[in-house]
Amino acid sequence: MSIQTVESPSRQRTRSCATALVCHRCENSYPLEQAIFACPDCGKGLDVLYDYELAARHFRDVPSAERPHNIWHFEELLPIVDASAQARVGQHSGYTPLIRADRLGAELGLSNLYLKDDSSNRPSLSYKDRVVSMSVARLLERGGTEMGCVSTGNVGTAVASFAAKAGVDAYIFYPNALENTKARACMALGAKVCQVEGNYDEANKRCRELAERTGIDFANITLRPFYAEGAKTAAFEIVEQLDWQAPDHIITAAAGGTLSSRLHKGLVELQLLELAETDPTRIHIAQPSGCNPIATAILAEEAEIHAVKPETAAHSLAIGNPGDGYLVIDAVLKRGGTGGFASDPEIFAGIDLLAATEGLLTEPAGGTTIAVLEKLAATGRFAPDDTVVAIITGNGLKTLDDHPPKPWPDKVDCELDAMQAALDELKRGGTLVESAREQLRF
Ligand SMILES: [Zn+2]
């Protein structure tokens, strides 16, 4: 693998206002082009710094209507500086719909409920298209030609898809529990897949060592500071789609903690640029009962995570030792938000409730968000007219084989009387909303 330095005079530059990498803990800073992903001094993760005055000027100069409706809409606040790398990645990613959810809202007693539908993100139907687009663009900036990742599910399909489009070889490492369709999708997209006998946290640790030994960049390990920046775009888009009125609440599922912590960073940046008043927005996170280290720490108001051994049907949330967990705790508590969790039956009931009211089929991560949203609404966490945005992070078509089967009547004769009898029988059955509400009642 040949790696070149990021900037050469002949390359055209994006409008990125990124200036440096900075340690989350000790605040030492490093050049943006330096190939590091953890602080050499203290080992903690790195954040990206920006020149916010310059970014504010750019935003005044180039109005929203003149910007592309894709992941690069807010390119000033993204870390990719090489315009040719940016042009090769993510032209159809991001900018997912913000859907007014009147029917789900009516079920939950919320009159201003919205869904940020990242289950329709491109190209791989999950929020991970935001973060992986940054990893792949960074890899191209550095002249890389191959990439690995460790994945609970959706990172893998995003890496497989982006890598194929960029002409990069992809190697996906999965832990022992995952939704099989996701691994099959990676192979269908031409990636090489390796499942290892260990949980995500164990696989993640070994992949870090593998990256160091082989020199192969891993999308969510060695490129992590860049990867994480992609998550902010969800916050930028939500606020712009609400006509620059920040919502009162955002709720999302949390696994490693990248999305929920960078929602906070994105909101802070919009406020810094005076694009919106975002300080009052609360962030709430949802986790499965069988893997809830971040929610538990938030509820106990503890600053550090106690790792757990995941046992949940929501495989994409099965991270027991979340790398960005401490950032999530800080973000949620600073903003007056909270954490909640849901059992596996409640998670699948959340999937059903969303499906039956809004026609959106999500995976267990999205079901977790809806189940916890229901609990927070039922306990009076939101005022009835608060603006609440729930982020739907993944698509249920990828996980349908893992959902509990629903009863399906035996095949009947293709004959009028038999079919009318079958129809009458179907009409006597309860609705999906009713059965979901039954499961969610606690
Ligand atoms: Zn440090």
Image (cartoon, rainbow, N blue to C red):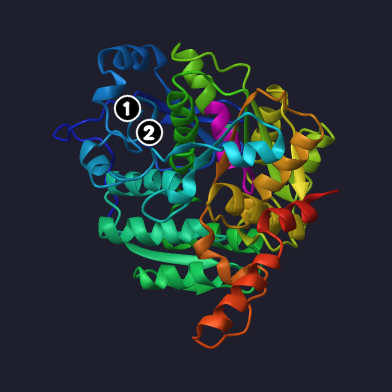
Q: In x, y percent, where is residue 323?
A: 63, 45
Looking at this view, is 59 or 21 the one in front? 59
Residue 177 can be seen in this image = no
Question: From the image, which quarter does the N terminus lie in?
Answer: bottom left
Residue at image point 38% right, 69% down: 191
Label 2: few (<14), some or many (≥20) within 10 Å?
many
In the picture of the structure, the residue carrying the numbered disc 1 is 16
Drawn side of residue 21 relative to residue 369, left or right:
left
Q: In x, y percent, where is residue 357?
A: 60, 48
Separation (CA) of disc 1 from disc 2? 6 Å
Q: Residue 301, located in which quarter of the rendered image? A: top right
Q: Is residue 135 magenta?
A: no
Secondary structure under the numbered disc 1 in the rendered image:
loop
Q: Amino acid at mark 1?
A: Ser
Q: Which residues are magenta?
A: 252-265
Q: Residue furthest front?
A: 417
Rendered view: 374 above or below 262: below
Residue at image point 33% right, 38% down: 70
Looking at this view, is 415 or 1 the one in front? 415
Residue at image point 58% right, 36% down: 102
User: Is the Cβ of the residue at disc 1 closer than 8 Å to that at disc 2?
Assistant: yes
Q: Amino acid at mark 2?
A: Pro
Q: In x, y percent, where is residue 256?
A: 62, 47
Question: Which tag, 1 or 2, sits closer to the chain's start?
Answer: 1
Q: Residue 294, located in which quarter of the rendered image? A: top right
Q: Is mark 2 within 8 Å of ligand 1?
A: no
In the picture of the structure, the residue carrying the numbered disc 2 is 79
Rendered view: 417 above or below 122: below
Secondary structure under the numbered disc 2 in the rendered image:
loop
